[in-house]
Amino acid sequence: MHNKTKKGKPMEYKYHQLHYLICKRVTRMGSRFVLFIMGLLLIGSLSLAQAQENQVSGTVTDAMTGETLPGVNIVVVGTTIGTTTDLDGNYTLTVPNLNESLQFSYVGYEPVTEPIDGRNEVSVTMEMTEIVGQEVVVTGYGTVRERETVSGSVSAVTGDRLQRVPTANLSNTLAGRVSGLSGVNYSGEPGSDGSQIRIRGNATLGNNDPLIVIDGVPARQGGLDRINPHDIENVSVLKDASAAIYGSRAANGVILITTRRGSTGAPQFEVNVSQGFNQPTTVPDMADAATYLTMINEIDRYRGQTPRTPESELEKYRNIEDQDPWLYTDTDWYDEGLKRFSNETEASMAVSGGTEVVRYRVSLRGLTEDAYYTNSATRYDQAEFRTNLDVDITDNIQFGADVTGRLEDRNFPTQSAGDQFRMLMRGYPHMHATWPNGLPGPDIEYGTNPIVSASPETGHHNIDDYYIQTNAYLNFEMPGIEGLAFRGNFAFDKRFQENEQWATPWTLYTWGGYVDGEPTLNAGSRGPGTPELTRQRSNWEDITYNIVGNYVRSFDDHNVAFLLGTEREIWTGQNIGAYREGFITDEFPQLDLGASENRNNWGNSWHGARQNFFSRINYDFRETYLFEIVGRVDGSYIFPEGDRYGFFPSASIGWRLSNEPWFQSFSGRLFDNFMIRTSYGQTGNDQVDPYQFLGTYGFGSGYIFNTSDLQPSLYEARIPNPNITWEVANQFNAGINMTVLDNRVSLEVDYFNYDRDKILWQRDAALPLMAGFSLPDENIGEVRSYGMDATLTYLQGFGNEFFLNTSFTASYADNEIVFFD
């Protein structure tokens, strides 16, 4: 029998009809799916074919050695599409089309831009940039020139050479790398280990420090000591009258530091980690206990006195190993107080890159230094960042913004390093530095045991410096006037300092003898009777802004550069401090917890300003005959209102004989470059106390008159000198530059003769002490300096694996005081 539906059709028929419909629907969907997949494959094939058609590959090699270069950065010009070469110097890159251009960049090599021109294989060769004689120097206010076209005495060193010396302080790295520049380090104390930098010796009776200019901003807070060497692109040192572009602050020379900036290409990461170990140069070899006591006995005999130490006791010190360690000791105080070495750890990282429009570089750095003391309270920590940003707003307008932040954290004990080392030297070898149970021994003198006073047991002295430095510039290239450009620069620097000294009593132990057969020690408090707190806060603010116009053109064989600018600098600062003692505990160093008696507070502020105008003209004919003229007018608040402006001119000439056909014929093309040059000019030095042209007064200790109260008093602090003026350096320099053997060997030699006059000094010999007052400073001092400096450099590359760059510098300076009364 057949089952029937309501319409009378069998169920089996309905099932087959449903099956047919489902199969039909599935078949249609499958067909569409197959067509969809086939379409995707077709599109993928077309895209793959197009991608393969737009695929460019090639090899990058060294132009000199033919070796392949791994890690070369390659980018399609105008885009962010890029790649790098592999270990064999090969690359593959898919480009939008074959009409683009590729830019190749590599550290230490000249960048190369190569049009694709429809090719699928583009191989290039790259030439090294770090070739002696082809370096660039910065000559002031952002002007970068090739070394061969500079007629003044300017030395330069690249940042990568400074990075190879892992020192925590940049000033310790420069010495020996620039001729004429010397550095003397008077302290290795962490946080205070900078060198005293001198350019061609001491040429004045006062301040001999050179002017430091960082990214075009002079005299930035913090100087050069704490700059990260990995952030430095170039350091130029202006040693002669070419520094006149900086006028009244250039007599001691100028050091120009340029930091690294970003470049077009994919992000590049850089990580540097170094671990250093410091040791004292020399540790004195002190007398042992037996020798010391023997010498004391000899002194007593010379004085006709009874020797203090009997011979039987001396014999015990000679055999110290067999004696009671509580009663007899032989202390090497340097060995007890100092470690074998101290640690210095540094880590930094940076990322840089950008497009054709925006370029950036960001860096971070951390640094820590430990001191030599066994249980040290001395430590230096530093953290910093730097961000450099450049933006091409239009083809004619460029904008840049730099921000730098740095924390310098210095930690010291409450007694100075000088006191610590003095007591280590004065320690008696027959006294205990520490007792056998580990407790500190007695004091040497004035309550000081250097094992304790160098530690946190006596409190702390913390100095925290916070720096924020900003710099913004705007470049404008005048359309329609080739070579004319203007640059405006605005820099704002802020520095804060927190200085806290928390001096607490400490405990030392003297021998108490044996009690019931047990050794006993007597505890004694040393240092201040109660904790003492001194807290001081200071801040500095500097604003510098300038605008500079620059015109650079070449007319056939004539090259002309003209610079004209003005600059203004304003700075302010203030300081406030307070002191209290009588704290009932050493746990809470807060001012409001101190006693009301014997407290004090103080404060002061300062401000200053400079205004100047400057100009420089450069001309050369076929880069063979070089001329430069510099003039600057400086105005300073330091001098009287009617005599605040000074004029500082200089001129230099150079002759590149290697460009002369007759010289090339004569020398047989031995010289790649040979130039003689000379300069003469005046620079100034205004690093003296301000307001000496004003009569100033101070608050005296007071007086008592018809009352029991102390009345305040005023006294004349200084007799004014209304004729105070600039210190002037008349500078003459002559030198030669030469490079030979395809720029591999370079020699630079300079002779200088300076006459510094109008140096501020007192007429000490003209006034007897019975006069009861001192004469003001007058422009009467004179110092004469002469000498020479030279640099010999050799550069050689050995394939792509090894690179040798060695320099020898020699400097001699004779500085004679002609007159200083």
Image: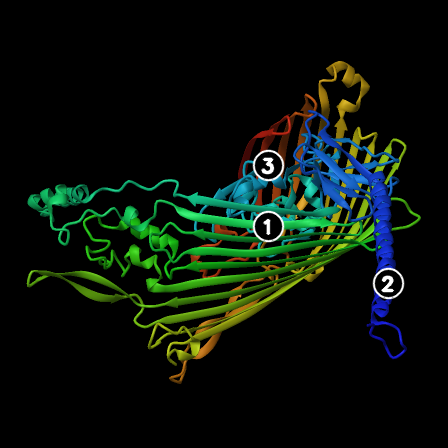
Q: Is residue 26 above or below residue 673?
A: below
Q: Which residue occupies 63% across, 31% down?
A: 751
- Residue 734, how many percent across, how many down? 67, 31
Q: Earlier in the sequence, mark 3 or mark 2?
A: 2
Which residue in the structure is indicated by mark 2? 20
Is residue 312 visible in this depiction of the protein?
Answer: yes
Q: Is residue 676 above or below residue 187?
A: above
Q: Earlier in the sequence, mark 1 or mark 2?
A: 2
Three-letter residue code for mark 2? Tyr
Dividing the picture into quadrants, the one containing residue 547 is bottom right
Callout 1: SS: strand
Mark toward the viewer: 1 or 2: 2
Tell me if 329 is positioned left or right of 410 in this view: left
Q: Which residue occupies 45% across, 67% down?
A: 500
- Residue 61, how many percent across, how many down? 72, 29
The image's mark for residue 349 is 1
**Alpha-carbon distance for marks 3 and 2?**
94 Å
